[in-house]
Amino acid sequence: MSTYLSAQSLSLAFSSVSLFDSVSFTLNQGDRVGLIGHNGCGKSSLLKLLSGHIDSFTGQVSIARQCAVAYVEQQLPDSLQNVTLVEALSATVKEDEIWRSELLLSQLGFLPRYWQMPVSYLSGGQHMRLLLGRAIINQPDLLLLDEPSNHLDLTALLWLESFLSQWSGSFILVSHDQSLLDKVTNTTWIMRDRRLYHFNMTCSAARQALLAQDEAQKQRYDSEQKEIDRLEQSAKRLANWGKVYDNEDLARKAKTMQARRQRLVENQTQLGEGVPWRLIFHGESLPADRLVAIEHMNVSPEASRLSLFQILQKQVKSGERVAIMGDNGCGKSTLLKNLYQFYQHQDEHTVRYHPQCRMGYYDQSLQQLLDSETLHDALIRFAPVNDDIRKRALIRAGFDYQRHRQKVGSLSGGERARLLFIGLSLARYHLLMLDEPTNHLDLAGKEELIATLSNYPGGVLLVSHDRQLIEACCQRFWLVHHGALTEYMDIEKVYDQLKQDEASCGYVSQADALTPVGPLQHEEEEDLLARLVELEQLLKDDLKRKPKHQKLARQAQWRLGIEKINRQL
């Protein structure tokens, strides 16, 4: 087995804060590594160091001559925003090999008519595909992937999972998506306590192994501490007797015992830092037939007459946790915003809330927090609790007392999200509406959220693409799809629907259909006409079947594909 990369005694610090210290590891051919850890522990920095983007470190990195390394950053460089897709992909390709870029664009799911489209028009999922394409076009042996699953919808996540499962090379993948990591990796590195823990197993198994290791260390620590305390008491007792009876032998034994105690203290087992903050929502169940009832609602962006989709006759009761799913841009977040506005204005013509219902809302844009307020004052509107409770809540969440008068506007995105979570945890809501709450959470934070939502007595409306969270917490699933909302009681049926879409018509987001592009070339028109004939024949053949054998979901997809092609032609 060939060694691709090895590191010896790597240490990295920024502004005197140490991220990791004396880290060593080896990566061999065939290793598919998942790199996990708390936010801010240094995962992305380690990838940048290995890819040569950081050179101010101590230690040594050795890369085998035969190993070509490619780094997949989190975002496209600003310099690419105004170039076309084919230009962005051809940057490292010889001029007479541009065909390789076009071939790869097709393999990545980009139709020919999009190849000359500016990169700035791409959706988040398409950005990720283009970044991967730029990395793999020269056929590297090792990929360094920095959170490629961030902000992707489920369709794009399923595509990424398929891509990495079929990738023949090695990779190091930084991600907070445990479902993705479990399916595509065979090795896990956990960064914690400025160290790197190595496990030759998938993410969930490695995290369980580390927990078992922590428990064993805690038992050793407790046993060692018990002996340290015993020696301390015995040494004091002997020293006291030595003074009382003027006995040098007893005094000498006391000093020997103190020396033994000190050696034990210096070599005592070190405990891990564990989870830095515990997230708990204190909800209440409202004994009623519904918390919210939607009679007939047009879901529309603010100040727009455009209807993204309609909802008829839906309601949520206490104890029900509903996942709202669908591609980016389909209107999921808009639905929650509309519901929140109806709650504030109590418009019962469209949406009826129970008169006693108290609702909490997590807005993924974090606009509920005012930049001009202090951290302490920003929490006042969430719950009528005293100052001491707010102070203790901030301190438990990692905000030192000296920061309580700091302005919200100076916080990072992750800190701002944590502050909003604190506010929601102080109140006792009957209904929670959470819009992408995992965007700023690491794996431990997600598990905290899963645990508190699983035991939440009220109702929950959850917009998320995180499969672990959805599968663990929710019993009902609303899929916004092709301009309509459909309810499922089985999550696997939602996944099947999304996979069918990708297989039948390729992954093109709703934003793509609205993207302005130039006139069709002759070859593109021929391709579209051929696809149109194929879709019309599929629909025609299926309609000939007996009604009980017809594939209604596929028919909807084919009709949508036919409509899109007709618009393009």
Image (cartoon, rainbow, N blue to C red):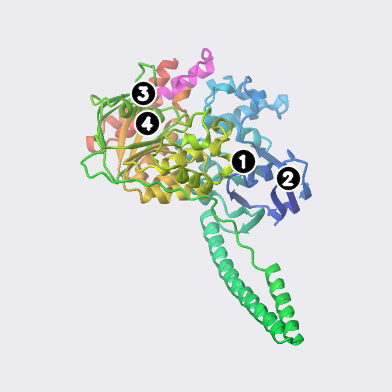
In the rendered image, residue 100, in percent from the top left (x then y), is placed at 64, 30
Q: Is residue 168 visible?
A: no
Cβ atoms under marks 2 and 3 closer than 8 Å: no
Cβ atoms under marks 2 and 4 closer than 8 Å: no
In the picture as drawn, the residue positioned furthest to the top comes out as 519
Q: Which residue is mark 4?
A: 336
Earlier sequence position, callout 4 versus callout 1: 1
Q: Which residues are drawn in magenta?
A: 513-533
In the rendered image, residue 298, in percent from the top left (x then y), is placed at 30, 23
Name the quadrant of the C terminus.
top left
Q: CA distance from mark 2 to mark 4?
A: 43 Å
In the rendered image, residue 313, in percent from the top left (x then y), is placed at 23, 32
On residue 367, which mark appears? none
Q: Is residue 310 above or below residue 194?
A: above
Q: CA distance from mark 2 to mark 1?
A: 24 Å
Q: Is residue 545 visible?
A: yes
Say what amino acid the circle numbered 1 marks.
Asp
Q: Which residue is mark 2?
A: 16
Tell me the crowding category of disc 2: few under 14, some 14 to 19, or many 20 or more residues within 10 angstroms, Cα based. few
Q: CA distance from mark 1 to mark 3?
A: 33 Å
Say what amino acid the circle numbered 4 marks.
Leu
Say what amino acid the circle numbered 3 marks.
Leu
Position of 230 compared to 543: left or right? right
Residue plotted at (40% across, 42% down):
385
* Nearest to viewer (mark 4 / mark 1): 4
Cβ atoms under marks 2 and 1 closer than 8 Å: no
Say which of 309 and 551 sits in front. 309
Q: Which residue is mark 3?
A: 308
Q: Which residue is mark 1?
A: 146
Query: Is residue 522 magenta-colored?
Result: yes
* Nearest to viewer (mark 2 / mark 1): 2
